[in-house]
Amino acid sequence: MSSISVLILTKNEQQDLPGCLQSVSWCDDVHVFDSQSVDQTVQIAEKFGATVTQRDYGPNKLAFGGDESAHRNWGLKNIAFKHGWVFVIDADERMTPELVNSAKVAAETAGEVVAFSIQRRDFFMRTWLKHVQTSPFYLRLFRPDKLHYERLINPVTVAAGPVTKIKGYLDHYPFSKGMHYWVERHNGYSRAEAQQIIQNRLLGGTFSFAKALFGHDFHERRYHQKELFYRLPLRPIVKFLILYVIKRGFLDGQAGLTYAALQSIYEYMIVLKVRELEAAQARPVGEI
């Protein structure tokens, strides 16, 4: 008997969901948290015996996500999980057997630990992007009452207690639906990121280099660190150099080069959309 519930977040995932569900078939409490899919996602989930909860993103319906953190936080608070631990997974991800075993042991022997960090392996062009990823570790196994999400898009997980790592890989296939889907999705992400940057600047006050390095409050320090990165000149090129040179993405071959280039393009899309939003804010009312 498992002591872990599984939460799968979906939106039109009929292609990838079956493989994901197969990788979590060991669990007796699988929940699919669906964002109003219009394909066969719900039917596939029900066929596998999963419990389906449907919800849109509320009043802030941004492209590809809306207020992602609010959506995820709603799920953690309102879905009736059978067990005290939850493993969150996306439809294009797969739990490896080693990870399944590690997760079960971790949940049974957690002690004061409230969340566990998992190493994710991203695959592209049949290659594990071992080096070019910004960070391969993600909080995915946790007590739902001890964790919440922040940010409009690409949420940050914040745990209220000790966190540690467990062995085993979570395999991720972000290009499973093709390059066109990745580009379309990140076009939406880039606008949401730009909106997040504008919101941060409105709420966070004046940027401080000292607070970015030495701020005592974690959230304050993280805000100023992000602002420091956002203010770097030639940020898309810096992003490429970080991933391809400093992170040694060149060791991932052609896949590493292509992925680093895609990420730098994505960063430039964010830069352009921040400029666009700032210009719109500065424009007098009624001016075109």
Image (cartoon, helix red, strand yellow):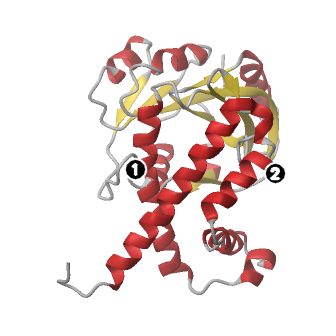
Q: Is residue 268 above or below residue 63?
A: below
Whether residue 195 appears in this view of the structure is no
Whether residue 128 appears in this view of the structure is yes
Which numbered mark, 2 or 1, is in the foreground of this view?
2
What amino acid is at disc 1? Gly
Q: Secondary structure at mark 1?
A: helix
Label drawn at residue 188:
1
Q: Quadrant of residue 26?
A: top right
What amino acid is at disc 2? Ile
Residue annotated with mark 2: 246
Q: Secondary structure at mark 2?
A: helix
Which residue sits at x=31%, y=31%?
37
Q: Quadrant of residue 136?
A: top right
Which residue sits at x=58%, y=29%?
5
Q: Is residue 170 above or below residue 232?
A: above
Percent across and percent down for residue 7 are 52, 32
The answer to whether the residue labelled 2 contacts the one labelled 1, judged by CB atoms less than 8 Å apart, is: no
Residue furthest left in the image = 286
CA gap, disc 2 and disc 1: 28 Å
Between 261 and 274, the one lying in front of the other is 261
Between 79 and 151, the one lying in front of the other is 151
Figure quadrant of the C terminus: bottom left
Percent across and percent down for residue 55 are 33, 41
Figure quadrant of the N terminus: top right
Between 229 and 205, the one lying in front of the other is 229
Percent across and percent down for residue 184 are 39, 41
Q: Quadrant of residue 251?
A: top right
Which residue sits at x=38%, y=16%?
44
Which residue sits at x=57%, y=44%?
262
Left or right of residue 166, residue 17 in this image: left
